[in-house]
Image: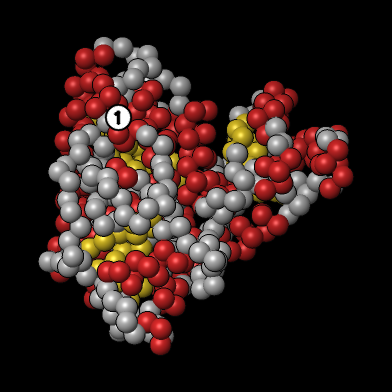
Amino acid sequence: MKKLWTRLTPFTSDTSGALGTLYDLNALGMVHDPNGCLSHYMAHDEFRRDAKAPYYVSIAQNQMDMILGNEVPLYRGFRQLIQASSPSLIAMVGTPVTALLSSDLERYAKDMEREFGIPAIAIHTTGEKLYDAGAALAYLGLCRRFVHGRNELRPKHLNLIGTTSLDLGSRETHAALEREIHGWGWNVQARLGMGSSLEGLAGAADAALSLVVSVSGLPAARYLQEHFGVPYLADLPVGQCGSARVQDKLAALASTRETDWQLSGSTEDITDAAALVAEAATKPATRTKSPDTDAVHAEANGSKASSLRQHPASSSTLIIGEQVSANALRDLVEQQTGEPADVATFFTFEASLSRMGDRALDGEAALEDLLDERGYKRIIGDPLFSRFLVKHEQDKDKLRQFPVEHIFLPHMAISGQLYASQLPLLIGADGEKLLLQTE
């Protein structure tokens, strides 16, 4: 019964995560399902309601045609949709149906690009993973398709990667993030996520570096590093101290990029020397089943690991959420309270971004166990986690403290739009206000 979920709503799927990354790209997103996956995304997983919304459609293919492989109606529908929408990009997005039938999304994409001359990609989501996995596939697919080479280094220009709508929660947060970046004297070269464009993405290899603000952006950032020598930093400027931290790290990383560019003396694709130094950080993202990670706490850009830090028995705060933003929030909490904090996540767990005591959660039981073991006095996370903070008779001999202060930090991938009105702004000085709120 360990995998039984009884208190939390289903998290956002990888199909919705992929669709969210395409929103600003004038893309035609073709979702291969009988209509369920797309309708759920539009109703619950997408808060943006712009006048010029993307053209997403479910192919709604007849069940027998799909099973028997009759593709004539399918291609007829493709042609009608493309002619009606005039997209800049065609994206074939997978679902449980395509995974079950092993549908050849790559062939569909190549056929459409050949016939219409419109760039097309296949995103192999299955509907069985979580939103961050789908967003990661989409970001990486876009980089592979549209970033082909570098021309000239653009100092003080960065790629902003991983601005997933489900993580940032609002366009206001995205705008605040870009204002913070401009305030440091930097410009955004390419965006992957909110505000993205195919034209900007084409120049991503010329950027001085990439700023990754969610774990879903790491595969794309590593691709740019390995193939074009663009180093990356995984961090988010939460609070004034966080803003200063990110600014300093960007400056240090940019100097490395300039040196590498001068040494290479070429405009062809390269594998940057920094990628070799960051070998540990270029490993695929993993989710561990063990309760604690024994990984070292590495620098966010993966360049060099610091000394192993033992988990402090006195950790008083648990932050539950996406790992990059939770790490940034942890730094703010520790500065404001003077007490250590832990991070836990139900989503992608990067060992290179973790500290001793951090935990990957594979279900509700894992969160229950963590709360029982550590006895935290403060929880920062989605309001739905309040369901784990109610004392029951069987809890009387456990370490979990009651009452536990719960600071609401809504995460749309967990609770959808239930608490969208309570989303706080965390970027820059606004982040300093989070600990002032209580349940």
For this rendering, which residue is in front, 120 or 171? 120
Which scheme is used to colour this image of the protein?
secondary structure
Q: In the picture shown, does residue 24 fall above or below 167?
A: above
Q: In the picture shown, does residue 295 fall above or below 75?
A: below
| Residue depicted at 22% across the width and 42% down the height | 299
Residue 311: tell me if it is visible: yes
Q: Label 1's element?
A: helix
* Number of dots carrying numbers: 1
Q: Is residue 275 left or right of residue 48?
A: left
Few, some or many C-alpha atoms within 10 Å of disc 1 (few <14, some 14-19, many ≥20)? few
Give coordinates of residue 407: x percent, y percent: 32, 74
Give coordinates of residue 321: x percent, y percent: 38, 60
| Residue depicted at 86% across the width and 41% down the height | 65
Give coordinates of residue 38: x percent, y percent: 66, 54
**Among all residues in the image, which is located at the extreme top?**
265
Query: What is the quadrant of the N terminus in the image?
Result: bottom right
For this rendering, which residue is in front, 401 or 264? 401
| Residue depicted at 54% across the width and 72% down the height | 6
**Among all residues in the image, which is located at the extreme left?**
338
Q: Is residue 390 left or right of residue 254?
A: right
| Residue depicted at 47% across the width and 62% down the height | 363
Under mark 1, the amino acid is: Glu
**Among all residues in the image, which is located at the extreme bottom?**
393
For this rendering, which residue is in front, 41 or 69? 69
Q: Is residue 295 left or right of residue 13?
A: left
Query: What is the quadrant of the C terminus in the image?
Result: bottom left
Q: In the picture shown, does residue 40 fall above or below 372?
A: above
Q: Tell me the residue that label 1 is attached to.
A: 279
Give coordinates of residue 347: x percent, y percent: 44, 54
Residue 163: tell me if it is visible: no
